[in-house]
Image: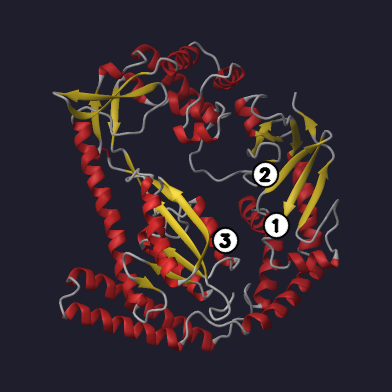
Amino acid sequence: MKAATSARLRAAVYTRYSTDNQRGMSIDDQLRNCRRRIDSEGWELTAHYSDQAISGGSVNRDGYQRMLNAANARAFDVLVVDELSRAWRDQVESERAIRSLEFAKIRIVSISDGYDSELKARKTIRLINNFKNEMAIDEARERTHRSQTGTVIRKYSAGGLPFGYKSVPRLVNDEHMGFDREPHPIHAPIIHEIFARIAAGESMRGVVSDLNDRGLPCPGAKWKRERQPNRLWRISAMHAILSNETYTGRYVWNRSRWEKDPETNIRKRIERPQSEWIVQELPHWRLIDDKTWERVQRRMGARSILFNSRVGGRPTYLLSGLLRCGACGGAYVISAHKPVRYGCSTRKNAGIGACDNHLMVARDLAEETLLGPVMYDLLSDEAIEVGVAAIRRMSATDAARPNLFTSDELRRLDEQIAELERLRDSGVLQPSIAAAALQRAAGERQTAWRALNERREKPVEGPFGAASEFRQAMINIRLTLQADDVMAARDALQEILGTVRLVPEDGILIAEVGLTQLPLAKAIGSTGLVAGAGYGASFMRIPMVRASARP
């Protein structure tokens, strides 16, 4: 990074407006404020990263991720935002990202809330602002839920427009009361056709294939249809439609909620108790008569029993969930029996128009092809010892790296706690806000103290753990793959290989395996231990020569 004394600091700006503030001019306003600060400091504006109509509580933002990648590449020296909430609404992500940026010596300046990573009280300011930002999200969520509840009670739509309807605003004495639903002139006839054909005995797969062949519009959020204009019908979408009782005029709301898993940052659906549901009978929403609905539900129930579907059940084959189609990206699943063969699920469920990969591979061949290199090359005694040596080499480098938690960090946290107590005692902070902020700061101090003492007592031997522990872990995986527990073996194989792409080339499926998950991948590649066509340092391609075409 260029020193401030030898060149102008390179400044990057991040701007965002959220889904609850659909105002494109907000980006211009933020950028103008940031430019003013950059000009006053004499910095050089080199990049502008932006996200529009997306919540700051999500990390899956294109502009945000590009900004973080540029920071990792040291593409700028200062990150300027109008306020911290534009970049971060989630406390956990905010703390993680800011610590990472500051550790990389990137200065962070937030104009409206006075944050500057060069200030001594930066952590106190950040803590208070992050707490307020997250509280604002919770309050907005509660307000939205109360508003939606009232909307449903008034017999209007609370959002989530199903395929087959269009949204229509309703006015009473020129006052907007809410949005109603009416049959969509193009999509509603498709819903009628689907239910009629399934009720008459046609298979979902046949109907899906026909709809795709005819190029009929399919379900999907509006933004998905705009970004992916060639979206296709799939059996999963068909199943969702056939199970949606809204088409009978019965509107069930508040059936579930979404919560973010703090470990994975993935939103999960949580079912609410039936006592919290709100049910409205809305005859003018009806698209399907009761007789057709009941006939379809009987067929769906019979199909469920026939295929013994297990929601959330564990896979029964060694490679289940590990294989992906190299042509379309869809999962490779069991598509035929006698013998059991894997095939592209997209081709199977959406027809030839969805994926032109018609190749299938016998289960025994797939397992034999992938297990061979793993057992005899990656998990051989020789390969394991190469990995052990590589870890020991990396340990020396890692030992020289500074620890995130140091005695200085403990002192800073003590100062932060003292400052929060002073602000509370002087009346600047409300007791409730101060209590929450102090609790979080105390927790961070405890974590830092524990990490510092663990490092003193047991020096870390490398980014992948102790070499001896690695050796034992690899031996345990080898023993697991040799045992009879298919589920345990599958989990072990996934840990090594991750996802395997099956690419069709000249009538043969080629298994493409990335080895980047293995800590010894580069070491093994440099010694050429793994045999296979076109093998590189962290990648191998293996032909499955007995792959067969789908009938």
Q: Is residue 55 left or right of residue 280?
A: right
**Residue 323, numbered label:** 2
Q: Secondary structure at mark 1?
A: helix
**Residue 481, numbered label:** 1
Q: CA–CA distance between discs 3 and 2? A: 29 Å
Residue at (25% x, 43% y) in the render: 145
Expressed as whole percent of the image width and height from the top left, the position of residue 169 reads 27, 25
Q: Which of the 4 quarters of the picture holds residue 292?
A: top left
Number of numbered discs on residues: 3
Which label lies toward us, 3 or 2? 3
Q: What's the amino acid at mark 3?
A: Asn
Q: CA–CA distance between discs 1 and 2? A: 18 Å
**Residue 227, numbered label:** none
Label 3 Cα neighbours within 10 Å, binned few <14 / some 14-19 / many ≥20: few
Q: Which residue is mark 3?
A: 69
Residue at (61% x, 43% y) in the render: 316
Which label lies toward us, 3 or 1? 3
**Colouring chosen for the image of the structure:** secondary structure
Q: What's the amino acid at mark 2?
A: Leu
Tell whether label 2 touches label 3 (CB within 8 Å): no
Expressed as whole percent of the image width and height from the top left, the position of residue 372 reads 80, 53
The answer to whether residue 17 is visible is no
The answer to whether residue 78 is visible is yes
Give 9 or 99, whichever is nearer the viewer: 9
Label 2 Cα neighbours within 10 Å, binned few <14 / some 14-19 / many ≥20: many
The numbered mark, 1 or 2, whose residue comes first in the sequence reads 2
